[in-house]
Image: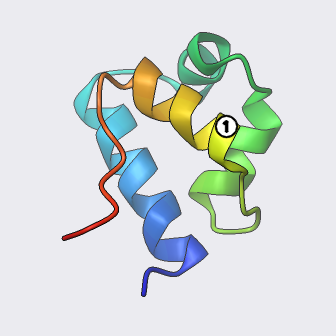
Amino acid sequence: MQTRETFGAKVAKARNRKGLTQEKLAEMADITQNNLSRIERGLYSPGVDILLRIADALDMELDFVE
């Protein structure tokens, strides 16, 4: 089972691979930069709507089965 910290680290890694700042990804996902920062640090558990917007902004899919 993934922890919030593990998930947040994956978001940060994907964002960095795309060359995006937190501010730019937050804008693309229509969330605040503060919320994105909290997600990346594992301090916030986003709902499915936010997860889908982040994945879409990163041009990725959410995988439920690995």
| Picture layout, residue 32 above or below residue 7 | above
**Foreground of the two, 63 or 6:** 63
- Residue at 59 percent across and 73 percent down: it is 4
- Residue at 25 percent across and 68 percent down: it is 65
- Residue at 71 percent across and 16 percent down: it is 30
Residue 63 placement (x, y as % from top left):
30, 55
Residue 6 placement (x, y as % from top left):
44, 73
Residue 21 placement (x, y as % from top left):
50, 24
- Residue at 58 percent across and 54 percent down: it is 40
Q: Amino acid at mark 1?
A: Ile
Q: Is residue 23 left or right of residue 17?
A: right
| Picture layout, residue 59 above or below residue 38 | above
Q: Residue lying at the far bottom in this picture: please name it.
A: 1
Q: Residue lying at the far left in this picture: please name it.
A: 66
Q: Is residue 58 left or right of residue 31?
A: left
Q: Look at the numbered disc 1 and give the secondary structure of its residue.
A: helix
Occupied quadrant, residue 45? bottom right
Occupied quadrant, residue 50? top right
**Foreground of the two, 56 or 41:** 56
Q: Is residue 50 left or right of residue 15?
A: right
| Picture layout, residue 20 above or below residue 48 | above
Q: Quadrant of the C terminus?
A: bottom left
| Picture layout, residue 40 above or below residue 52 | below
Q: Mark 1 packing: few (<14 Cα in 10 Å), some, or many (20+)?
A: some
Count how many numbered circles sit on residues in the image.
Answer: 1
Look at mark 1 in the image and give the residue it sits on.
50
Q: Quadrant of the N terminus?
A: bottom left
